[in-house]
Image (cartoon, rainbow, N blue to C red):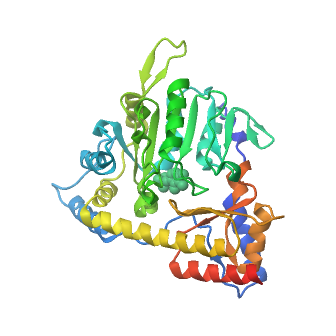
Amino acid sequence: MALINEHYLKLTKNYLFADIAKKVNAFKVSHPKSNVISLGIGDVTRPLCPAVIEAMHKAVDEMATKDGFHGYGPEQGYQFLREAIVKNDFLPRGIHIDPSEVFINDGAKSDTGNIGELVRWDNSVGVTDPVYPVYVDSNVMCGRAGSLIDGKWSNVTYIPCLEENNFVPQIPDHRVDIIYLCYPNNPTGTVISREELRKWVNYALKNDTLIFYDAAYEAYIQDENVPHSIYEIKGARKVAIEFHSYSKTAGFTGIRCGYTIVPKELTASSMDGNERYPLNPMWYRRQCTKFNGTSYISQRAAEAIYTPEGKEQVKAVIDYYMGNAKIMRETLTKLGLKVYGGENAPYLWVKTPEGSDSWKFFEQMLYGAQVVCTPGVGFGPSGEGFVRLTSFGNREDCEEALQRLSSWIKG
Ligand SMILES: *Cc1c(COP(=O)(O)O)cnc(C)c1O
């Protein structure tokens, strides 16, 4: 008799996007002539840039030849890409990463979801709230989150990111074993300064806490004072694993490629506290067993974004999305809404006007302006009273949506 992993039964059904789709469909049925615009899209929409396409075509052609064919690649990723990452993403910021500390993956979701395998199921966990659901749910699946009581998991410390603290998470007053940080943040679109991030690294050094740092939106940073990598902070190599993704950086959501940094100095303790074990060889062992690498074609595609043309083209797309974010921010602010984020991230976190909760404002916006947003409460208890807007759409749609929001709010 196969017994199930009962922790899966505890998972709350993540109906957020299904619920949104249901409500939008209901609206469309009763308003068949309406043209609904979504500012809720969590996916990029611009096509891949020419440098990437060219590299992919070339890689495909290679695969058609006897000498250029690539079968299984190294589980950790091809050396050419790991070296390009070290040279372009870290060295210019004064960060020394060895290619053996870089693990190419099929996107950051897999690794942020799987990394917890390296540590015991009974470690305590901290997350900022609201939060990217993968961090919490992957801990529920292995039993680490505990049980759900009043909408919160008993073994998870929720660190509220609220207007009151300008969305800067406060250091907990107790120790946690593992903490997830995501900056620039999804869903709030907010960032933390180097000084704030230093507090977390120091907390981790002092408390022997392991930090999982998700830098998926690093390429959207515009401010000099916002760190692109946790390794810009002294001591971080001893306490942090960092996740990167080409999904939002270069439109790779359908290509699938990213990478994870596991520094050689990073260790965790044995049960009795007498020994320290490095996590880099453990992650290598894990990947070699459970992962057979990202496709050669995808890795060549990723390499191409580090060429001079690739860099320029990728930046142009990010500038396009950030251009959307800027007009969204300005227009909504002029309309009297409180808007956070959107300056170093493709997300805007908008406070619902008085009297509306997240879902109510979502419906009001849908029926009043035929514009779709994402209710903030879907990302955690502290998301109540906010909605998330994304700047991943077309400029024309974005402008049309803002026009409608203006008429709706003014009318
Ligand atoms: C989109 C996103 C990722 C990237 O996921 P991929 O699997 O690389 O496509 C990672 N973290 C966060 C918070 C995201 O929003």
Residue that appears at 42% across and 59% down: 249
Which of the 4 image quarters holds residue 407? bottom right
Residue that appears at 54% across and 12% down: 272
Query: Looking at the figure, which quarter contains the N terminus?
Result: top right
Query: Which residue reaches farthest left?
Result: 67
Q: Nearer the viewer, residue 346 or 148?
A: 346
Count of marks, rendered view:
0
Residue 5 in the figure: left or right of residue 278? right
Q: Nearer the viewer, residue 366 or 95?
A: 95
Q: Position of residue 19 (x, y in %)?
A: 73, 62
Query: Which residue reaches farthest right?
Result: 355
Residue that appears at 77% across and 44% down: 151
Q: Position of residue 16 (x, y in %)?
A: 69, 58
Residue 170 appears in the figure? yes
Residue that appears at 53% across and 28% down: 119
Which of the 4 image quarters holds residue 365? bottom right
Q: Nearer the viewer, residue 13 or 136?
A: 136
Q: Position of residue 305 (x, y in %)?
A: 31, 60
Residue 52 appears in the figure? no
Relative height, residue 362 to residue 271 (above, below): below
Which of the 4 image quarters holds residue 318? bottom left
Relative height, residue 408 to residue 44 (above, below): below
Query: Looking at the figure, which quarter contains the C terminus?
Result: bottom right
